Image: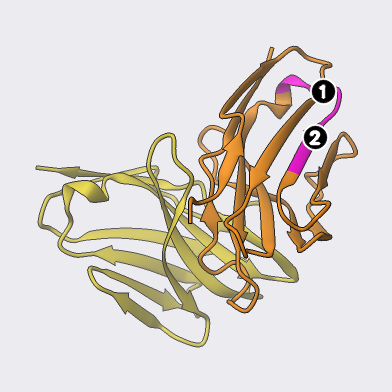
Chain colours: A orange, B yellow
Amino acid sequence: DTGVSQNPRHKITKRGQNVTFRCDPISEHNRLYWYRQTLGQGPEFLTYFQNEAQLEKSRLLSDRFSAERPKGSFSTLEIQRTEQGDSAMYLCASSKLGGHPNEKLFFGSGTQLSVL
Amino acid sequence: DQQVKQNSPSLSVQEGRISILNCDYTNSMFDYFLWYKKYPAEGPTFLISISSIKDKNEDGRFTVFLNKSAKHLSLHIVPSQPGDSAVYFCAARGGGADGLTFGKGTHLIIQP
């Protein structure tokens, strides 16, 4: 069990560019979550998957954001036409079906995005 | 509108004493509450949780108390240790959403 892995750890991009982040959950965890955290704030829920199905999306997830989990394993989060307001830490978490939802979410170390 | 509030951005406690972190919420539909701990450059780590049907849950040095009528919960750490220095987030589940709602966090500093 190597924990939740996120890549890259840091990403610097210019406004208007597209970026994609990857999350590898703990194996056998079938729930996967994306959160965003800005300075001085707590993590904000973006979306979550159960296996390959995207079950919930926050209103924070604008149409420039898209998340996929095509085979029910790793997930990608893409941001198109990035804006400076997208600068944040993007956190991925996973949990195992059968446990209480959101109980003992295992978080990755996050991807820090800076939009210049 | 912030549904989960941690009004103390930071808290300093002497090693060996009790640390008490507070959290207030506004959504009466929340049915499950959690505390997470976060070190710099790491993701949050689950610490302890409590269901809305209980008023206390204890796990070693950590105890969470829930006062539903006041919409208030607190995390007690006793005795406090240097390794407890971290940012603590209160989170809540429910209200029609599966995602957790987090507070802004409290930075706990344990002084020797």
* B4 relative to B9 in the view: left or right: right
- Tell me: residue B71, above or below residue B100: below
The number of callouts visible is 2
Label 2 sits on what residue type? Glu
Reading the chain from its start, which is encountered first: label 2 or label 1? 1
* Quadrant in the picture for residue A71: bottom right
**Magenta extent:** A76-84
Residue B104: horizontal and vertical position, in percent? Answer: 51, 46
Density class for disc 2 (Cα within 10 Å; few <14, some 14-19, many ≥20) is some
Q: Which residue is mark 2?
A: A78
- Tell me: residue B72, above or below residue B42: below
Label 1 sits on what residue type? Asn
Q: Which residue is mark 1?
A: A18
* A37 relative to A84 in the view: left or right: left
Chain ID, mark 1: A
Quadrant where the C terminus of chain B is found in the figure: top left
* Quadrant in the picture for residue B63: bottom left
Residue A22: horizontal and vertical position, in percent? Answer: 69, 38
A2 vs A109, nearest the viewer:
A2
The lab-note entry on whether marks 2 and 1 share a chain reads: yes
For the point 45% across and 47% down, the residue is: B105
Q: Are marks 2 and 1 in contact (CB under 8 Å)?
A: yes
B33 vs A54, nearest the viewer:
A54
Residue A84: horizontal and vertical position, in percent? Answer: 72, 20
The local secondary structure at tag 2 comes to strand
The image's mark for residue B54 is: none
Residue A19: horizontal and vertical position, in percent? Answer: 77, 26
Chain ID, mark 2: A
The local secondary structure at tag 1 comes to loop
For the point 44% across and 34% down, the residue is: B41
* A63 relative to B81 in the view: left or right: right
* B10 relative to B35 in the view: left or right: left
